[in-house]
Image: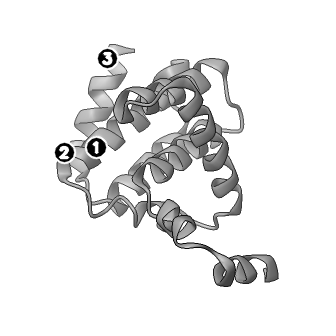
Amino acid sequence: MFDAIARLFTATDDDRLADSDPRLAVAALLVHLAAVDGHVSDVEKQDVRKALMQHFGLDEGSVRALIHEARRRDADAVDYYHFTSALAHLEEEQRIAIIRMMWQVVFADKENHELEDNMVWRIAELIGISARQRTILRNEIAKAS
C-alpha cells in the first residue's frame, strides 16, 4: 500500500498519461479475460496479441511490451474501473470494437466459461454498451468460431 502511495507522488507526467492510455486499458482487460477462467491457452494468448496488433496497428515488439505492462497493471488492479474509466469516453464504435475483441478472446478456445461471459457483461455495462449490442456481438463471434 505504501509503495502505491509513493508511486502516486513520484509518478511523472508520462506515467499518468500511460494510465489513461486506451491501449493499456484494453490490453489489461484482454489479459485478465484470458485468465479469468483459471487457464490461459496458447490460442487465447495468440488472440490477445492479434486483437491488439490489428486494432491498434502495433508491431510484435510493441504488443509484447504492451502486454507485459498490462499484466503488471492487471496484477495491481483491485477492480475494472481503473481500466474502464479510460474507455468510457471513447466513441461508441470504438467501445463496440473493444467488446468484439473481448468476445474473440472468449471464443478463441471454442469455450465460453461463465466467468468470461460475466466479465464481458460487466465491462460492457461499465463502458456503456447495451445488453442488446453485447448479445449481438456475442452471437456473431460465436458463429464465426
Q: Nearer the viewer, mark 1 or mark 2?
A: 2
For residue 93, which numbered disc appears in the image?
Answer: 2
Q: Using the image, determine if residue 105 lies above or below residue 11.
A: above
Element under label 3?
Answer: helix
Whether residue 111 is visible, yes or no, is no
Q: The residue under label 3 is which amino acid type?
A: Lys
Mark 1 — residue?
134
Mark 3 — residue?
143
Alpha carbon distance from label 1 to label 2: 13 Å
Does the CB distance between marks 1 and 2 fall below 8 Å? Answer: no
Q: The residue under label 2 is which amino acid type?
A: Glu
Q: Residue at x 23, y 35 (%)?
A: 136
Q: The residue under label 1 is which amino acid type?
A: Arg
Q: Position of residue 43 (x, y in %)?
A: 59, 18
In depth, the one of 2 and 14 nearer the eye is 14
Q: Earlier in the sequence, mark 1 or mark 3?
A: 1
Q: Nearer the viewer, mark 3 or mark 2?
A: 2
- Mark 1 crowdedness (10 Å alpha carbons): few <14, some 14-19, many ≥20: some
- Mark 2 crowdedness (10 Å alpha carbons): few <14, some 14-19, many ≥20: few
Alpha carbon distance from label 3 to label 2: 21 Å
Q: Using the image, determine if residue 88 lies above or below residue 121.
A: below
Q: Earlier in the sequence, mark 3 or mark 2?
A: 2
